[in-house]
């Protein structure tokens, strides 16, 4: 549980809207800890077991020849589906927040 004096703030927005710039400012100038969801998403997707699960669910087109995830193809397939693929991200970020 987060202490009452601590707040969790989520930065959302489209590409090139200043999320990273604001996060860097909050971290550098004010010492605010930053959890970068993109970083954790890459760790999750880079797991070989996740790649295999994605292949079984969406087909072999989601994997490159070297068996790594074809991120652009995966994005085409999952982003139109509401809520798809976010369970692992939520679990990962919750674990990081609790550890803070």
Image (spheres, rainbow, N blue to C red):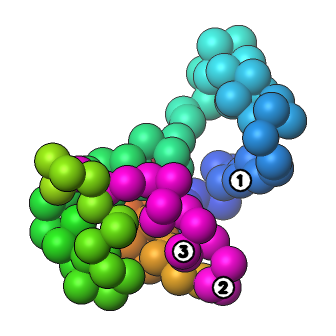
Q: Residue at x 17, y 73 (%)?
A: 52
- How much space separates mark 1 and mark 2, taking CA atoms? 19 Å
Quarter assignment of residue 69: bottom left
Residue 12 showing in the rendered view:
yes
How many labels, in total?
3
Q: Which residue is denoted by mark 2 in the rendering?
A: 82
The numbered dot on residue 77 is 3
- How much space separates mark 2 and mark 3, taking CA atoms? 11 Å
Q: Nearer the viewer, mark 2 or mark 3?
A: 3
What is the secondary structure assignment of the residue under circle 3?
helix
Magenta residues, start to end: 68-82
Q: Position of residue 89 (x, y in %)?
A: 44, 66
Quarter assignment of residue 27: top right
Q: Is residue 74 left or right of residue 17?
A: left
Binning the other alpha carbons within 10 Å of mark 3 as few (below 14), some (14 to 19) or many (20 upward) gives few
- Up the image or down, 98 lies above or below 40; here it is below
Binning the other alpha carbons within 10 Å of mark 1 as few (below 14), some (14 to 19) or many (20 upward) gives few
């Amino acid at each position: 549980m987060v202490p009452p004096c601590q707040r969790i703030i989520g930065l959302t927005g489209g590409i090139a809207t200043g999320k990273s710039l604001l996060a860097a400012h909050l971290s550098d100038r004010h010492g605010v800890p930053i959890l970068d969801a993109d970083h954790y998403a890459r760790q999750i997707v880079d797991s070989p077991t996740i790649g295999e699960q994605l292949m079984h669910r969406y087909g072999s087109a989601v994997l490159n020849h070297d068996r790594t995830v074809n991120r652009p193809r995966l994005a085409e397939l999952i982003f139109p589906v509401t809520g798809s693929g976010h369970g692992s991200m939520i679990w990962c970020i919750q674990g990081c927040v609790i550890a803070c």
